[in-house]
Amino acid sequence: MAGYVVVGSQWGDEGKGKIVDLLGTHMDMVVRFQGGNNAGHTVVVNGKTVILHLLPSGILNKDALCVIGPGVVVNPFVLFEEMDKLADMGFDCSNVRISDRAHLLMPYHKYIDELEEIDAGAGKIGTTKNGIGPCYADKYNRIGLRVCDLKDPQVFRERLKTILEKKNRQIVKLYNGKPFDYDEMVAQFEAIRPRLLPMIIDAVDKVNKALDDGKNVLFEGAQANMLDINYGTYPYVTSSSPTAAGVCTGAGVSPKKLDRIIGIAKAYSTRVGEGPFITELHDETGEQLRKTGNEYGATTGRPRRTGWLDLPVVKQAVTINGMTDLAVTKIDILSGYDTLPVCIGYEIDGKVFDTVPASISDYEKAKPVYKEFPGWKEDISEVRRFEDLPIECQNYVRFIEEYCGVRICLVSVGPERSCNIILNELI
Ligand code: GDP
Ligand code: IMO
Ligand code: MG
């Protein structure tokens, strides 16, 4: 076994960072394959909390090569800020590499993201305003700048000149915004070039050679299935494919090389930003979940919307990703409820569905169909064996397994690396 994948199965923030860090201690390489610094992955080791945005969550394992893959959109200024912060905390970042094919997330992408959100008014997506959508849009529109373009300053300058003229026209004419100064931007990139150049690699070659040599390579997904550009609650999604298939396109790896695909599911649901959320709680219970679960965005600090576990959502992620395993996180947060409703279907126009609707108008009509589980009162954060969990908690977990048709490999009962109940060894 060599190729491992960790992906989110809801709307992000399931605890992917924690599980990647846990597995990271056994990895030779940890690779991000999509997204950018919209991600906020929290790792807690010995009471120290680290939030990672662009750096792979394998960074705390100093023996793992951390690769920012071809499918990622890279804001190099944010990357260096993050590396400097980690260095200040005493972590070694000399093992970070960046794919030559990754797209550069430029200052105008971030600005356009902000302008577009303002312009959309009530119709906004609720993005992280980090420029992710505009950067991917340019990539597919074939007017992106890539990391490899920085290798030759003249190529970079020439391409930037043409592109920036276009972007400035868009900024000024469409949004009445402030144009960027070309010389200033060239100087900004000239300043970081010497630091970036030694980190650039042919990641496709490096990753495939590692896999072919039988090394352990972990692909770290950001965001999640319901934020996927194809399968999420479009248009309230991100602009990449955070699925196992995204590993193939975003890291240049064959599906044949992915041996274990581990989905992460939070024991309840959260969402940041706008968009449908059928099991959302607008009451005190929702507030209680937010408070006890500390549900505030790791990237933007925004309060996360909260609700009961929505199993058709998780099941869709199991199917699309071809998950071999599911890790259930934050179950400790569910202690103290008399009953725990779990959504097993949606009623739309009098019919019940157990699949996720495509259209926003169906979402608006959908009512959750709940199965109620008796809750438990005990604090379970110190439990390390499944059979020591309250029987109600065991039943809750076993139902997820049964409904989704995938084995549960791990139940996480706290943010620390060590707070886990292992059901099936991961490595
Ligand atoms: P990611 O984006 O999927 O990596 O998740 P985030 O880091 O954005 O959000 C998950 C939050 O839950 C972080 O604050 C983690 O430290 C925390 N966390 C992860 N697993 C557990 C768990 O099992 N129990 C509790 N109480 N917190 C957890
Ligand atoms: P991690 O990796 C939760 C959400 C944003 C917004 C939508 C589009 O930490 O799980 P974008 O900036 O990507 O264009 O925003 O996607 N979003 C996330 N929500 N966790 C994330 O990442 C997210 N990354 C983006 O809130 O609704
Ligand atoms: Mg997060």
Image: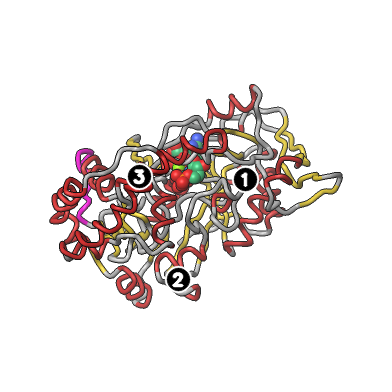
Secondary element at image label 2: loop
Secondary element at image label 3: strand
> On the rendered image, what quadrant is the N terminus found in?
bottom left
Q: Residue furthest right?
A: 350
Label 2: how many residues lie within 10 Å, few (<14), some (14-19) or many (20+)?
few
Residue behind mark 2: 1
Task: Tell me which numbered mark, 3 or 1, is placed earlier along the sequence.
Answer: 3
Q: CA distance from mark 3 to mark 1?
A: 34 Å
Secondary element at image label 1: helix
Q: In the image, what residue occupies the spot 69% across and 52% down?
A: 356
At label 3, the amino acid type is: Leu
Residue closest to the eye, 85 or 262: 85
User: What scheme was used to colour the molecule?
Assistant: secondary structure
Residue behind mark 1: 387
Residue behind mark 3: 52
Image side of residue 237 versus residue 366, left or right: left
